[in-house]
Amino acid sequence: MPQAPSHPPPYSIECSSFPPPIEAAAGSQAWAFQRAFESSREPVRWGILTTMRCWIDTWPFKGVELERERIQQAYDQAPIDLKVTLDYIITNKFPFYFKSDGHRRCYDLYRTGRIQEAETSMLPQEDFIREYNAAVEPVKDAIASTNKRWIWYEAYTEISPVSKEEVVQAYANVSDPLKVVLSWMLATGWTIRVGNPRFFEQSKAAVHEMCLNHATAHIELHAMNRLVGMY
């Protein structure tokens, strides 16, 4: 039976330097991300390395100038939201980096033209449960806090705090405007409490500004990379 290699493939632009494919039973994904990294253009590799180093949440390689031969090791130890972001960069061949799951989510909404849809739509109960369970803890905390504060805003009635576990059941009974806010928070990875409509408008404006700044920076990066002959 073929064995998964104990060492990563050598760092090289040439695909011929990769090890031969491995049978699935022996662990075909053993070095999958390393191979994808090596087959990418240099600006994309830079985006991967910078995302790993600058990721806002704590993880074993935060702030580390990572040697390229350790990419697979770092990827295997990355939290799920960071893995999703790294896969997103590789799949789309982006030559830039992201600092958080929310950063990636907002940019994807902006890039695909769904940002206005996210600002006006509310998730069905089943979809909300799925998205909420997959969210990172800071988003869950912000949603639980928003739920309590918004209900107080609507009814001027103090309610008992809703735990993160109870939010999914409470969602079915809240007002439609609050459902839109909570759905938007999941879509954007928003980690700050949204207590009233005015703050919701301010939060949406902040996302628009961040996306515009990000898009502008990406255009400049593309131009610089072309100028130095990386494309």
Image (cartoon, helix red, strand yellow):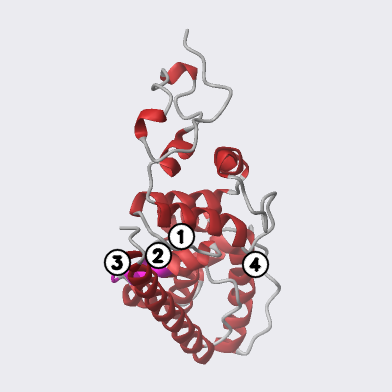
Quadrant location of the C terminus?
Answer: bottom left
> x and y percent of residue 15 in the render?
35, 33
Examine the image and state in which quarter residue 160 appears.
bottom right
Kindly identify which numbered label has been placed on residue 128.
Answer: 1
Within-10-Å neighbours for mark 4: few <14, some 14–19, many 20+: some
Instruction: Determine which residue is flagged by label 2.
Output: 123
Who comes first in sequence, dot 3 or dot 4? 3
Residues at circles 1 and 2 in contact by the CB criterion of under 8 Å: yes
Which region is colored magenta?
107-113
What amino acid does circle 4 point to? Asp
Q: Amino acid at mark 2?
A: Leu
Q: Quadrant of residue 114?
A: bottom left
Q: Position of residue 132 (x, y in %)?
A: 52, 58
SS for tag 2? loop
Q: CA distance from mark 2 to mark 3?
A: 19 Å
Binning the other alpha carbons within 10 Å of mark 1 as few (below 14), some (14 to 19) or many (20 upward) gives many
